[in-house]
Image (cartoon, grey):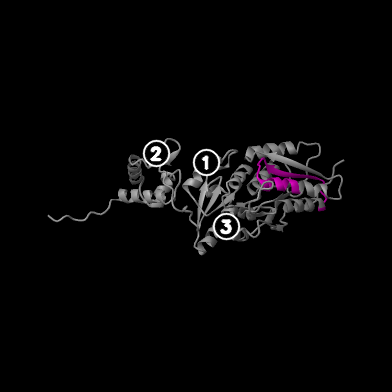
Amino acid sequence: MQSIPQRQSLVSQTVTVLRNGIADGTWRDWLPSERALCQQLQVSRNTLRTALNQLQRAKLVRAEHGAGTRILTTTEPSAPALPAGDVALLSPDPLEQLRPTQTLWIDALRAMLGERGCRLHVFHGRQYFRSNPGPALQKLLAQHPHGCWILTLPNEAIQHWFSEHEVPCVVAGSVHGDLALPSRDLDHRAMCRHAAGIMLGLGHRQLAIVIAQSRLAGDLESEAGFIDGVRMSPHPDAEAIVCKHDGTVPGIGHSLRRLFERAKPPTALLVANAYHYLAVVGRLAQLGRRVPYEVTVISRDEDPFLSFMMPAPARYIANPQSLAKSLLEPVLDLLAGRAVTKPTLRLMPDFFRGETLGPPPPVVR
């Protein structure tokens, strides 16, 4: 009886793809997570696990509890397989938890890269943004090699790691210290210096910046710019107050209550986050401080929801398309193996005066 050719089973095909990926260096040291592999290979988890079991019996991989699937082969590929057109974006939080303006420039950049035949992959996780992110980052990059990485909201530790390991990357933010990493960001120092000047020009002398206790370079530059704007003014009686909080609604409320318990409470506030602006104006209403009649408030950041607030917040408005376009150039340079022509670029957004600016209330004697 003549034998009938048998189609290769889906498990066998999956094994072949995994073997080839290991052999040509697509993955090194560790395989991606099961969820990521299922999405990449378009197979079910049962099919993938059966294929992985075959690779384990062949001693090509080993499952390590709580860590993932380690690659055991010592075969070195003839050439490293870095997808030249693939770009990775690394964020501490998933896209749906980022501020709307951040997701807008990410979507714009994804479209710009797609027009040039490049793909943008998003990875997130707090483990990559710890004080010692090395082990997590090493595993991530071994599982997911890319031609260029974009670092969003990066702390100093993650910037140092990418710099020391010479991984092609662009910081979507400000760089810490003297690290030689290309970066694109808003000019937070200039913005906050300008905000201090606006407040001083209205007659305010007790000014405060309300800012989270982060170690992001942009926040540090904001604080420095605000203080410089007050100190460099011709008003010796002006005071710059830094009001730190933990980023939560109760924490913001507690910090504001203490701020207005001062012997000389501020009459003007600069809030360094659009979400935090919502909490600040809500707390001011609870404290009986009317905006702008008793307190002037400016938001350093823009987000679409602020346009629905009354009174309309004074704020700095940046075009997400402009930020995406500024990031595109260094990303394409790094993908092509070229040096970034403009390592640092700061964008100055437009100032929208809104309806939350006013003179300080008269002093009651």
Judging by the rendered image, the residue that carries numbered circle 1 is 136
Specify the segment rendered in magenta.
201-225
Camera-near label (1 vs 3) is: 3
Q: Quadrant of residue 182?
A: bottom right
Q: Position of residue 305 (x, y in %)?
A: 61, 53
Q: Residue at x 80, y 48 (%)?
A: 230
Q: Residue at x 57, y 57 (%)?
A: 334
Circle 1 SS class:
helix
CA–CA distance between discs 1 and 3? 23 Å
Camera-near label (1 vs 2) is: 2
Kind of residue indicated by mark 2: Arg
Circle 3 SS class:
helix
Label 1 packing within 10 angstroms: few (<14), some (14-19), many (20+)? some
- Is residue 195 part of the magenta span, yes or no? no
Label 3 packing within 10 angstroms: few (<14), some (14-19), many (20+)? some
Q: Position of residue 330 (x, y in %)?
A: 60, 58
Circle 2 SS class:
strand
- Is residue 212 part of the magenta span, yes or no? yes
Q: Would you say 38 lies left or right of 223 here?
A: left
Kind of residue indicated by mark 1: Ala
Judging by the rendered image, the residue that carries numbered circle 2 is 62
CA–CA distance between discs 1 and 2? 18 Å
Q: Would you say 291 lies left or right of 157 here?
A: right
